[in-house]
Amino acid sequence: MSGKKTELKGRAARLARLLPPSGGQAARAPFVLLVVVLLGGGLIGLLVLNSALSEGSFQLDDLKEETKSLTDEEQSLQRDIDAYSAPQALLRRARELGMVPGGDPAFLEPDGTVKGVPSPAPAAATPLVLAPEALTATAPAAPPMPSTTPGR
């Protein structure tokens, strides 16, 4: 064998063509640098993603707590509305304003005749007007309304 390279055959020749010539050490540095940069960038990306997800989780917890608070307030306001619109509460407030139950109604027929016998409403006592907040603490229970319909 002289100073010439030995000739490779078959699979070894194909592999030798894939490898760089003897100065291959210098070509590895950019590859290693690329791998390090990609790994570092991936780790930084994961850190940013994790931080964003944590922040979103905290915001979600805050919004859930705010939703619960607003739902409780809505239910409280609905209870207040129900209390003010209850028949006994309406009757009590109407009496406090001096309103009285109406008498028997009379109706006008299309030809102009009156159907029924109208009766006046009973006289009312002087109304006592107070704020609704003051009434709930001091108001006595309203007595039942007398029936003004004759024959019953």
Image (cartoon, rainbow, N blue to C red):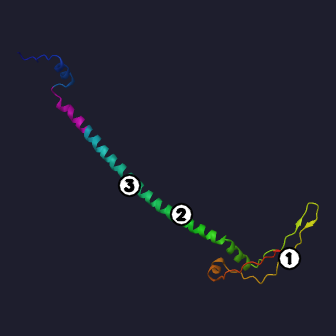
SS state under label 3: helix
**Amino acid found under the numbered disc labelled 1:** Pro
Find disc 2 in the rendering and name its residue.
Answer: 71
For the C terminus, the quadrant is bottom right
Give the Cα distance between marks 2 and 3: 26 Å
| Residue located farthest toward the front when viewing the structure as drawn | 152
For the N terminus, the quadrant is top left
Q: Which segment did they paint magenta?
A: 22-33
Q: Residue at x 66, y 71 (%)?
A: 86
Q: Residue at x 18, y 29 (%)?
A: 24
Q: Are marks 2 and 1 in contact (CB under 8 Å)?
A: no
Find disc 3 in the rendering and name its residue.
Answer: 54
SS state under label 2: helix
The mark nearer the N terminus, 3 or 1, is: 3
Q: Is residue 33 above or below residue 107?
A: above
Q: Nearer the viewer, residue 54 or 85?
A: 85
**Amino acid found under the numbered disc labelled 3:** Ser
